[in-house]
Image (cartoon, helix red, strand yellow):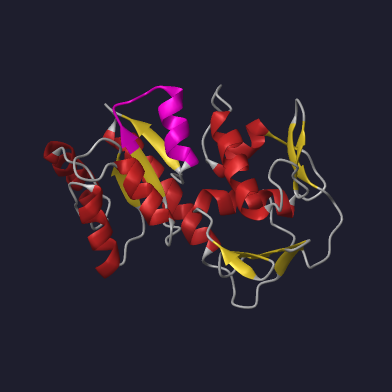
Amino acid sequence: MVDDEAEIIQLMSIYLNNEGYRLLQASNGLEALEILQSRQVDLIVLDLMMPEMDGLQACIKIRETNPIPIIMLSAKGQDIDKISGLSIGADDYVTKPFNPLELIARIKSQLRRLKQFNSGPANANEIHIDNVVINIASHTVTVDQQEIKLTPREFALLHMLAVNRGMVLSMNRIYEEVWNEPFMESKNSVMVHIRKLREKIETNPREPQIIKTVWGIGYKIESEQKGLLPSPERS
């Protein structure tokens, strides 16, 4: 947890310890980067406003090499602030003041999703979409045989569209399955993640050929398929 407010870290350490998590602490982005170089970390709760290196700068730096789940934490509650955090690679956004139990629930949700994508068998099928290859077991994506870095939420979004290939998925459904919570009125989160995903996998993000927009409904990947597509179990 990266925050310059010691009281918040002390409070959350109590809740996290009670849930069985081990908490590493940093008071700014520079300290967080130092910890990431020497310690195994599964998730980061990253405050936006901090001295020396703020949360936005730290998130950008982390995303250069690390797809670790990041929950942004900030007293700013305007949509533009949330969009900024999500645009640079954050997976979730919690506004201060917050309920510690809500933050715990969001942490658990991110870690469940990370475990889900890292628990497949070593010989799991790959999904091939033109020049894009999604490996479910290793939680990796390559474009033209070059691995690209996706956040866990970006990977979950691409995986959802791929396994439902040919189907139009509404923003409501995408949000509820990928974010694992009821759909909010604002559609910005889905739109921002689709845009960032297109920037990483599309040859021309302005004229996407893989992730198509179905205006007024949602998004889809066309049904033509060149590789093996695992059939997901659905409840």
Picture residue at 44% right of the left edge, 49% below the top = 110
Is residue 145 in view from this perspective? yes
Is residue 39 in view from this perspective? no
Q: Which residues are magenta?
A: 73-87
Magenta stretch: dominant secondary structure: helix
Quadrant housing residue 20: bottom left
Picture residue at 57% right of the left edge, 44% below the top = 196
Pick the residue in front: 46 or 228: 46
Q: Determine whether, in the image, residue 139 is placed left or right of residue 94.
A: right
Q: Determine whether, in the image, residue 222 is placed left or right of residue 192.
A: right
Picture residue at 49% right of the left edge, 40% below the top = 87
Give the vertical position of 180 relative to 21 (above or below): above
Residue 109, given in percent of the width and then of the height, sits at 44, 46
Callout count: 0
Residue 74 magenta-highlighted? yes
Give the vertical position of 77 relative to 180 (above or below): above
Give the vertical position of 47 relative to 126 (above or below): above
Picture residue at 37% right of the left edge, 48% below the top = 59
Residue 47, given in percent of the width and then of the height, sits at 28, 39
Pick the residue in front: 42 or 199: 199
Residue 84 magenta-highlighted? yes
Residue 162, given in percent of the width and then of the height, sits at 72, 53
Q: Determine whether, in the image, residue 22 is placed left or right of residue 225.
A: left
Question: Most extreme residue toward the bottom, as rendered?
Answer: 123
Q: Determine whether, in the image, residue 91 is placed left or right of residue 234.
A: left
